[in-house]
Image (tube, helix red, strand yellow):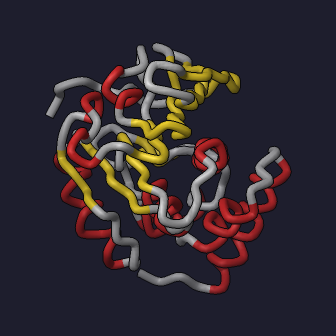
Amino acid sequence: MKDTFKHKGMRQQLVQVVKDKGITDTNVLNAIGKIPRHLFMDSGFLDHAYQDKAFPIAADQTISQPFTVAFQTELLQVEKGDKVLEIGTGSGYQTAVLCELGAHVFSIERQHELFKKTSKFLPKLGYRAKKLIFGDGYIGLKEEAPFNSIIVTAGAPFVPNPLLSQLAVGGRLVIPVGDSVQVMTLFIRKGAKDFEKHEFGEFRFVPLLEDKN
């Protein structure tokens, strides 16, 4: 669990890359610069940890590209103390970014292997989500709703209604929608049944699977 000056230097280079691609939110950039991404990957892949690309992790999943993590997080406009629901805990890297921003994070993971690993690992780095849950992200987390924002970190063929219904008014849902290629989509809840939709170009994610625990 070492984080050396070399790692810190590589992280600052990564921050510059992400910045050059258009990320402007200082808090998000600071989080990317602070979190030891190499610890979220197998030690053999140290050279890949601070490149701006996705990388395979356990259970046929990936740790998202840092730019994608920063892009999704910037769209959420997280403020300290916000209640954020994350669908797809994965390696826990996105969870750590949200914690670094001061969010109260509730995160759902459907792969048991990943859930167990990440539940043990995140607290060791000092990142404590409010709740890490093993379950089906499609149904959200009704008992903790409403959320200031919801982030989906896997490609969804459609937008699950429960997630829209669990947003607070003024809340933001960021979700990659599509089959083989996804369009990054932002929904802002304007009223009980009123949502504003924005689209932000194409991304590639592993699929969000339903009821596959």
In the image, 28 versus 182, the foreground residue is 28
Q: Picture coordinates of residue 123 (x, y %)?
A: 32, 75
Quadrant the N terminus occupies: bottom left
In the image, 178 versus 164, the foreground residue is 164
Outermost residue, right side: 20
Q: Picture coordinates of residue 42 (x, y %)?
A: 40, 61
Question: Residue 209 appears in which quarter of the rendering?
Answer: top left
77 horizontally vs 149: left or right: right
Instruction: Examine the rendered structure and indicate whether residue 17 appears above or below residue 170.
Output: below
In the image, 38 versus 46, the foreground residue is 38
59 horizontally vs 102: left or right: left
Q: Picture coordinates of residue 189 (x, y %)?
A: 53, 30
Instruction: Examine the rendered structure and indicate whether residue 173 appears above or below residue 70.
Output: above
Question: Residue 119 appears in which quarter of the rendering?
Answer: bottom left
At x 67% / y 50%, what residue is drawn? Answer: 52
Q: Picture coordinates of residue 8 (x, y %)?
A: 66, 78
Instruction: Examine the rendered structure and indicate whether residue 148 appears above or below residue 155.
Output: below
At x 32% / y 37%, what residue is drawn? Answer: 60
At x 27% / y 48%, what residue is drawn? Answer: 144
172 horizontally vs 20: left or right: left
In the image, 164 versus 169, the foreground residue is 169
